[in-house]
Image (cartoon, rainbow, N blue to C red):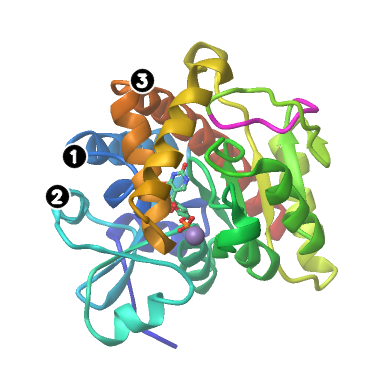
């Protein structure tokens, strides 16, 4: 096994067998601007503590896989330049060559599983990009959900993605996509979309039981929980559609490809909405952290 460095609070939670919620770090380094990124990351960690679980922010620091960051490590990561964005393909290389890398949803799931953590909260997952029929740009996050047994709580998928195609890939890969408390699949900045979610659950306990049952049946893979953004933080889809279209056409015109696509779009949307996209993003991540904490606590009981 590779060496994993745990934060003091994660080590204590592991010893006590109490609930732990994993958090990704790409959202910190490539998803939000400094200094809000560090403030939000610390706030989300506190939300998890307030909900009675322990946060474990995951990142590779100078070639060492960290599960749980101390406050000063989080602060340093949030300000660091040239941090690699690491997904399934890159995380072993990042560790091997001693670099610093922020983990995507896929890489965070891999690390969480190695650390025995079953629940992970984030904002939005990667998916099938618009124009994927020519670019073939499909996030490794989708395939990770099919093979790594971690329940990921997100606010659905961003409208920068082709959401119908994203749902199709998840279905093909056998990933349970569960809307929380509603029938429709939430669309990140909007609680509702025109698409109905394949599954619906109304309590954290049901979600925990579904995770447990999947494992008990010997099925690999996790679950995607699509938790709608709180109503007061929503941004109307009509407001965002032209912004997203503009960001996308700029990305195309500038020849942005590969890993750079998602960070480019997020940054442009932030600028074009004068920060409103970030305010909504913060509200939904915090909401996801709270639900993930409840699921993690229910799983502790089930696993006992
Ligand atoms: N979507 C968001 N915010 C994010 C990301 C996606 O709304 O911060 C990040 C996550 O870390 C996700 C990654 O795993 O981008 C997906 O990147 P790609 O599309 O290159 O796989
Ligand atoms: Mn991609």
How would you rate the neighbour count of disc 3 (Cα within 10 Å): few for under 14, some for 14-19, many for 20 or more?
Answer: some
**To which residue does mark 3 refer?**
276
Q: CA distance from mark 2 to mark 3?
A: 22 Å
Residue 178 placement (x, y as % from top left): 75, 42
Q: Are marks 2 and 1 in contact (CB under 8 Å)?
A: yes
Which residue lies at the image location 23% right of the left edge and 39% below the top edge? Answer: 33
N-terminal-most mark, 1 or 3:
1
Quarter of the C terminus within the rendering: bottom right
**To which residue does mark 2 refer?**
79
Residue 113 placement (x, y as % from top left): 54, 69
Which residue lies at the image location 41% right of the left edge and 53% below the top edge? Answer: 261
**Who is closer to the viewer here, 117 or 141?**
141
**Who is closer to the viewer here, 194 or 180?**
194
Secondary structure at numbered mark 2: helix
Q: Nearer the viewer, mark 2 or mark 3?
A: 3
How would you rate the neighbour count of disc 1 (Cα within 10 Å): few for under 14, some for 14-19, many for 20 or more?
Answer: some
**Who is closer to the viewer here, 249 or 136?**
249
Residue 115 placement (x, y as % from top left): 48, 70
How would you rate the neighbour count of disc 2 (Cα within 10 Å): few for under 14, some for 14-19, many for 20 or more?
Answer: some
N-terminal-most mark, 2 or 3:
2
Confirm if mark 3 falls within 8 A of ligand 1.
no
Magenta region includes residue 277: no
Query: Which quadrant of the structure image shows residue 173?
Result: bottom right
Residue 141 seen: no
Which residue lies at the image location 57% right of the left edge and 44% below the top edge? Answer: 161
Secondary structure at numbered mark 1: loop
Residue 126 placement (x, y as % from top left): 53, 52
| The magenta segment | 182-188
Which residue lies at the image location 23% right of the left edge and 69% below the top edge? Answer: 100
| In this view, 287 is above or below 70 | above
Mostly what secondary structure, the magenta segment?
A: loop
Image disc number at residue 34:
1
């Amino acid at each position: 096994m590779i060496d994993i460095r745990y934060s003091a609070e994660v080590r204590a939670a592991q010893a006590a067998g109490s609930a732990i919620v994993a958090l990704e770090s790409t959202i910190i380094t490539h998803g939000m601007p400094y200094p809000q990124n560090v403030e939000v990351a610390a706030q989300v960690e506190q939300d998890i503590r307030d909900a009675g679980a322990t946060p474990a922010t995951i990142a590779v620091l100078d070639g060492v896989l960290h599960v749980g960051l101390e406050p000063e490590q989080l602060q340093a990561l949030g300000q660091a330049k040239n941090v690699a964005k690491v997904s399934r393909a890159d995380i072993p290389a990042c560790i091997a060559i001693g670099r610093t890398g922020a983990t995507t949803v896929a890489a965070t799931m891999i690390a969480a599983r190695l650390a025995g953590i079953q629940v992970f909260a984030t904002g939005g997952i990667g998916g099938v990009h618009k124009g994927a029929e020519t670019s073939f740009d499909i996030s490794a996050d989708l395939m990770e959900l099919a093979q790594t047994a971690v329940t990921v709580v997100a606010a659905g998928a961003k409208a920068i993605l082709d959401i119908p195609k994203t749902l199709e890939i998840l279905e093909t890969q056998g990933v349970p996509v569960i809307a929380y408390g509603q029938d429709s699949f939430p669309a990140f900045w909007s609680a509702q979309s025109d698409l109905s979610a394949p599954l619906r659950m109304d309590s954290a306990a049901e979600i925990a039981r579904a995770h447990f049952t999947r494992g008990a049946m010997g099925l690999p893979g996790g679950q995607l929980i699509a938790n709608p953004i709180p109503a007061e933080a929503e941004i109307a889809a009509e407001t965002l559609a032209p912004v997203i279209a503009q960001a996308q056409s700029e990305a195309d015109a500038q020849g942005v490809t590969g890993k750079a696509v998602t960070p480019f779009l997020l940054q442009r949307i932030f600028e074009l909405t004068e920060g409103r996209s970030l305010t909504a993003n913060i509200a939904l991540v915090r909401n996801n952290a709270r639900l993930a904490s409840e699921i993690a606590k229910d799983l502790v009981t089930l696993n006992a």
